[in-house]
Amino acid sequence: MGTAARSFPRAAIGLRNPHLAQVQERRPDLSWLEIHSENYLLPPLAPRFKAIEKVRERYDLSCHGVGLSIGSASGLDRNHLAGLKELYDRLEPCMISEHLAWSVLDDHYFNDLLPLPYSSESLKVVCDNIDLAQEMLGRRLLIENPARYLILPDSDFSEPAFLREMVARTGCGLLFDVNNLFVSAHNLHLDTAVYLWDLPIEAIGEIHVAGHSHQDLAEDGKVVDSVLIDDHGSAVTQEVWTLLDVLLSIAGPQPVLVEWDNNVPPLEILLAEAEKAQRLIDGCRLRDEVSHVA
């Protein structure tokens, strides 16, 4: 398939196991799909890998890693990196990505993507790990901004400044998650316009949108605040669609992925969400064409 997701930006869905057989049978009108890399590492899941190889014959794939632990101060697991390299060499994905987080301590893997302070020390750790990963994988990594719930102490950078410095030092790109920004902005009272103004927009190679949940915080029986949880368990909210449109108006057309990992709906609902994203991409492209003619 080549590089359809990049050369002609399209919307896509995350391909999860409940929909694997349906996608193979129905062949929805998409140019690319995203998979979680660790679900297809060889050799333990060989039958599932053979299924994704069949999907790869028709679609470009973006491989989204969830276990590399880019923020680990102890460095990266080279065996895990070797497994990823084998996977990527066989699938030849159009994009590969990892989270700006850590999840490994003393060889123990946690189920959560844990936050790190935006400090000079953390920046060096992250950049060293990205350099090693890109060297071993032989590919450019896209790093995803996290959903945040608190401001960690000892931070020297805002998140956009940290991302900008990370990109400049390593040459990596960004997987920018619009829902994560929306969640973080609500929880930490951030100004999204100020955030986007400081972001290295030119480094964005893929965009995510997803759903989130709302939880009230009570004190003495009264609601005093609320927190948004990035749970990927519902449809994208209108506020996140609006923020995506703002980002596209700044960044230009980009490949956009709809994530839905919990309470996974029927395939038709996911495809309808992707159609919404595609309309925003097409609208962005049309605005660009009009502005160039003018």
Image (cartoon, rainbow, N blue to C red):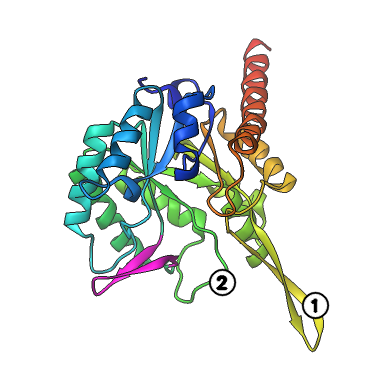
State the quadrant of the C terminus. top right
191 above or below 175? below
Residue 226 location, x and y as percent? 72, 70
Quarter residue 80 falls in: bottom left
* Region in magenta: 101-115
**Is 43 on the left-hand or right-hand side of 247?**
left
Q: Main secondary structure of the magenta part?
A: strand
Tell me the amino acid under the disc marked 1: Val
**Is 139 on the left-hand or right-hand side of 209?**
left
Q: Judge whether residue 259 can be spotted in this image.
A: yes
Nearer to the camera, 131 or 221: 221
Which of the two discs, 2 and 1, labels the residue nearer the N terminus? 2
Mark 1 lies on a secondary structure that is: strand
Badge number at residue 150: 2
**Is 14 on the left-hand or right-hand side of 93?**
right
Tell me the amino acid under the disc marked 2: Leu
106 above or below 134? below
Residue at (44% x, 52% y) in the render = 163
Mark 2 lies on a secondary structure that is: loop
- Per the image, the residue denoted by label 1 is 223
Residue 196 location, x and y as percent? 59, 47
